[in-house]
């Protein structure tokens, strides 16, 4: 999984340095805020121990180059147990990067987040993890988009990795977007 994270980081760096001109409208996009929520499905060996969870995430992105955005992300993810395992509350606090394939109209993107996950279960712990994501931003009105994404969270633990897939959606706000 660490190789997947390095591959995602290398791909983002490669795409950020590709020589393509942006449009005049996109130069004003310096800041983005988003808020997502949605169901989370535990995968792997622990899939039988937990019901479908719920996540609420938020974050901030700064436009570092033509289509590369860097920022911070955080949230609250909750999983209820089945069959006697302890309930799990997870708080990710991550550094984030994403690459938008388009900066106007419908905007597909890839991204990755990584950093500590604060886990509250039978015992409290802090583990490192990574979360690659695929997403789509759909413009709703000037300055507001609908952000839809699929995120695969991998929390590295000593014995086994805790993994889950989230299907998320919510509003995104671009405070510095100007009208044409």
Image (cartoon, rainbow, N blue to C red):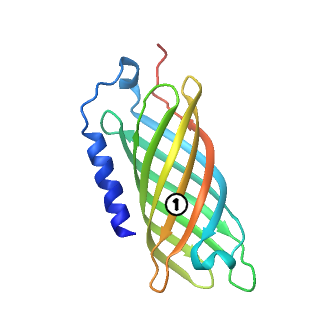
Residue 26 vs residue 1, the one in the foreground? 1
Q: Residue furthest right?
A: 83
Q: Nearer the viewer, residue 44 or 65?
A: 44
Is 93 in front, or is 51?
51
Q: Is residue 142 left or right of residue 52?
A: left
Side (left or right) of 168 relative to 105? right
Crowding around mark 1 (Cα neighbors within 10 Å: few <14, some 14 to 19, many 20+) is many
Q: Which residue is mark 1?
A: 152
Q: Position of residue 154 (x, y in %)?
A: 49, 68
Looking at the image, residue 118 lies above or below residue 151: below
In the rendering, at what x and y percent does residue 114 appear? Answer: 41, 61
Q: Position of residue 4 (x, y in %)?
A: 37, 63
Would residue 74 be found to the left or right of residue 81 on screen?
left
Can residue 87 be seen here? The reply is: no
Which quarter of the rendering shows the N terminus?
Answer: bottom left
How many numbered badges does the structure rendering display? 1
Residue 118 on image: x %, y %: 52, 71
Whether residue 60 can be seen here: yes
Q: Give the residue drawn at x 46%, y 80%.
A: 157
* Residue sticking out furthest to the top: 180
Which residue: 31% across, 61% down? Answer: 6
Q: Assign a secondary structure to mark 1.
A: strand
User: Relative to 32, does residue 161 appear above or below in the rendering?
Assistant: below
Image height of 111 relative to 80, above or below: above
Q: Residue at x 54, y 43 (%)?
A: 34
| Image-based side of 93 in relation to 83, left or right | left
The answer to which image quadrant residue 115 occupies is bottom left
* Vertical comparison of 109 with 125: above or below: above
């Amino acid at each position: 999984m660490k190789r997947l994270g390095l591959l995602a980081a290398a791909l983002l760096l490669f795409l950020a340095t590709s020589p393509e001109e942006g449009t005049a409208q996109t130069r004003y996009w310096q800041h983005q805020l988003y808020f997502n929520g949605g169901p989370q499905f535990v995968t792997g060996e622990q899939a039988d121990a937990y019901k479908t969870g719920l996540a609420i995430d938020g974050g901030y992105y700064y436009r570092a180059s033509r289509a590369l955005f860097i920022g911070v992300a955080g949230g609250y993810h909750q999983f209820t147990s089945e069959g006697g395992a302890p309930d799990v509350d997870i708080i990710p606090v991550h550094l984030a990067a994403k690459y938008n394939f388009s900066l106007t109209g419908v905007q597909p993107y890839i991204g990755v987040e990584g950093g500590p996950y604060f886990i509250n279960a039978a015992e409290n712990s802090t583990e490192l993890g990574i979360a690659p994501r695929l997403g789509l931003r759909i413009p709703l009105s000037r300055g507001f988009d609908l952000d839809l994404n699929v995120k695969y969270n991998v929390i590295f633990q000593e014995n086994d990795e805790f993994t889950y897939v989230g299907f998320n959606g919510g509003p995104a706000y671009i405070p510095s977007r100007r009208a044409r």
